[in-house]
Amino acid sequence: MKITKVEALQKIANRIRMDIITEIYYGKSGHPGGSLSIADILAVLYFNEMNINPKMPEDNSRDRLVLSKGHASSALYAALAEKGYISKDELLTFRNINSNLQGHPDMNKVKGVDMTTGSLGQGLSVANGMALNSKMDSMGYRVYCILGDGELDEGQIWEAAMTSSKYNLDNLCVIVDSNGLQLTGETDEVKGINSEDVEQKFRSFGFNTITINGNDIFSIINAFGVAHMTKGKPTAIIAKTIKGKGISFMENNVAWHGKALNDEEYKLAIEELMAKEKEIDREMEGDN
């Protein structure tokens, strides 16, 4: 079932954020910043965009998602739990030694995970293979690949981008989580790839490109609509996001790239997100 009401998707994204920080709090490790930044994108993908069914997780006709930035696994697990692939209780086992929910997603252990990821730079190559298979076998499914902006430092990304273009993979949609921060600092300082360059780079590799506010539900929906209408070339959505989005003391703070919350931080974060949920509920009531 697709949910098209923007406020409903905002509420789902907010619940995904709650689960992200709960996973990381209980797991005592993880990557909150870049997980929180993609919550809105995942809410739209799983509840408005992708052709998927949690009761048939291995259906060959399903759309695929490759989370190339696999360290943001807490966001993926939260979305899968919200959609019904896994239980919410299982999220509390995040990164435990015997848990299926490891720090990087494993397709052999978690229903709904389409590709095991974690080694940065490899996801787009895999997504190409999936998209090419869909075309060769006339399957009709679409493939989505979420990249980190720091991940664009990897040369394999650009080799893969040439392949996407060569084979006219118009059933492939790349989403770049362009939050401007990576492990050691700002992306434009680490290797000189600033966010303003990214769209031009993908365009030069033969992609249809769109730059949007990646934390705005309406903009995300519209961008996927453009991707659907684009024929003969892949699409790259440059999603300008805020690292740590939704939690004031984490936003645009590189220190929260890979860091767990203590008791007080967890309490404050939950309070902020609960206040946001009440705000969304009031907006939804006002629309009725």
Image (cartoon, helix red, strand yellow):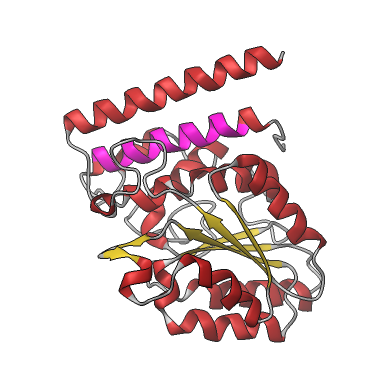
Relative to the observer, which residue lies in front, 285 or 68? 285
Q: Quadrant of residue 6?
A: top right
> Percent position (x, y) of residue 218?
67, 41
Count of number-bearing discs: 0
> Percent position (x, y) of residue 30?
28, 51
The residue lying at 29 percent from left, 49 percent from top is 253
> Percent position (x, y) of residue 70?
41, 61
Q: Magenta stretch containing residue 277, yes or no?
A: no
The residue lying at 51 percent from left, 65 percent from top is 115
Q: For this view, does 243 lie left or right of residue 217?
A: left
Residue 3 seen in this snapshot: yes
Residue interval drawn in magenta: 9-26
Which quadrant of the figure contains the C terminus?
Answer: top right
Q: What secondary structure do most residues of the magenta stretch adopt?
A: helix
Please say if 75 is above or below 10.
Answer: below
The residue lying at 22 percent from left, 45 percent from top is 260
Relative to the observer, which residue lies in front, 197 or 179? 197
Which quadrant of the figure contains the N terminus?
Answer: top right
Residue 54 seen in this snapshot: no
The residue lying at 62 percent from left, 44 percent from top is 44
Please say if 269 is above or below 93.
Answer: above
> Percent position (x, y) of residue 262?
17, 36
Q: Quadrant of residue 102?
A: bottom left
Q: For this view, does 3 lie left or right of residue 27?
A: right
Q: For this view, does 17 lie left or right of residue 12?
A: left
Relative to the observer, which residue lies in front, 142 or 151? 151
Q: Magenta stretch containing residue 12, yes or no?
A: yes
